[in-house]
Amino acid sequence: MSHRIHRLAAGLALAGCAGFSHAAGFALIEQNASGLGNAYAGAAAVAQDASTVFFNPAGMTQLPDRQLVVAGHLIKAKAEFSGTVTPAIGGGDGGDAGGLAVVPNAYFAFRLTPQVHLGLGLNSPFGLKTEYDSNWIGRYQAIKSEVKTININPSIAYKFRETLSLGAGLNLQWVEATLTHRQPLPAPVPLVTIKGDDYGWGYNLGALWQLTPATRLGLSYRSEVDYTLEGTSSASDPVVGALNGPVTAAVTLPDSASLSLFHKLSPRWDLLADVTWTGWSDFDDLPIRGTVNKTTVENWEDILRYSLGATWHMSDQLSLRGGVAYDEAPVSDVYRTPRIPDGARTWVAVGGQYRLSRQSVLDFGYAHLFVNSPGLQSVDNGTTLNGSYDASVDILSAQLTLNF
């Protein structure tokens, strides 16, 4: 039971929509479609549309007077477990714990004065959803894990001179989680459901330097967000009253920092690069209070994400993009759980942009993520799961940008 609550807060730290994690542990980097084709290389420096509110608010000084961006992402995650459980309790391997999700984002930016730009973003920065067959061999550890976030991000940018802009934003976040598992008790072996939510806030900062007419350097930082989740635990069998009651869990979503480079190699070719650090070492333990009192050791580690990309401006109307990236995994086999079957990922991405008119632009992209077979040595609720996952992620995105 206590480890279930631990999974709740872990899940809440993973807020978002479906699939299992797609970048930086369980962060959702899918914050626009215009960057997907480059595997989000150069995201803090490219400043090509209003989604820069998320990646680097200083980039708003590169935009026209008013711009609206609306994007949507179809994310299909695959996570198939194979292994054993001790003691043997019967059941299958759980099927595909991944699923299909839709993740939307929207941004608006406008020029208030020649130097001051304002913006607003609506997105989901973290995400997780896994769901196994209800009677699989790991049912005492996890069945369903679903967490969502909504982030509202008002921002401001100031152009100090033609070569330097600074930006800042406020992040107002809401998280909600639903987690289930079966409790190893005499028949009917109740299904335990844990629900919780909370609000939190943080900030993001950015700087953009125009080093030469052809080269921009972007630096951005997103702060931690602290939560104290409040929720309830309930069992499908009302006789099991000890499993019913309030719970709380303190958790911190990690901070992150990105250094990006954009270079116009020629009128037809752009080169992009990026390195992003995420401070997952904040997720070192999890104190649970309420119906259950327990502190769980997590021992996650800080990680880096590396990406390279290129854009070919094929004509005045059509541009094509490509990119590769590598995400480190913050968790080892010993601390990995079936709720978060996270592993290191290698991205291969393609995409493009079609200019419908002077006022409207369509962006599209596709990425496949090769996940390095995450191993599992999870002990919980009197059972030990040993095995590994066959995992991957596919992402298809589209975006409409309107200038007015």
Image (cartoon, grey):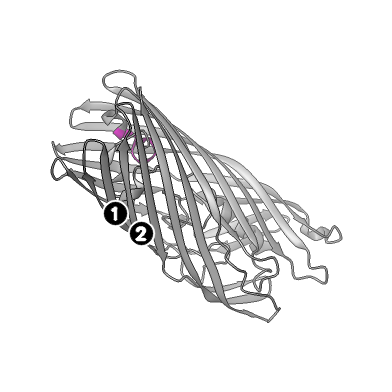
Q: Amino acid at mark 2?
A: Trp
Foreground residue among 307 and 172: 307
Q: Does 363 lie within the magenta span?
A: no
SS type, badge 1: strand
Identify the residue under disc 2. 347
Where does the image place residue 243, in percent across and percent down from the top left?
Answer: 77, 59
**317 vs 40: above or below:** above
Q: With 335 as the anchor, is 156 left or right in this view?
A: left
Foreground residue among 293 and 357: 357
**141 vs 322: above or below:** below
Q: Amino acid at mark 1?
A: Gly
The residue depicted at 34 percent of the width and 55 percent of the height is 349
Identify the residue under disc 1. 323
Q: Magenta span covers which residues?
A: 53-59
Q: With 120 as the anchor, is 377 left or right in this view?
A: right
- Distance from Cα at disc 2 to Cα at disc 1: 8 Å
Q: Are marks 2 and 1 in contact (CB under 8 Å)?
A: yes
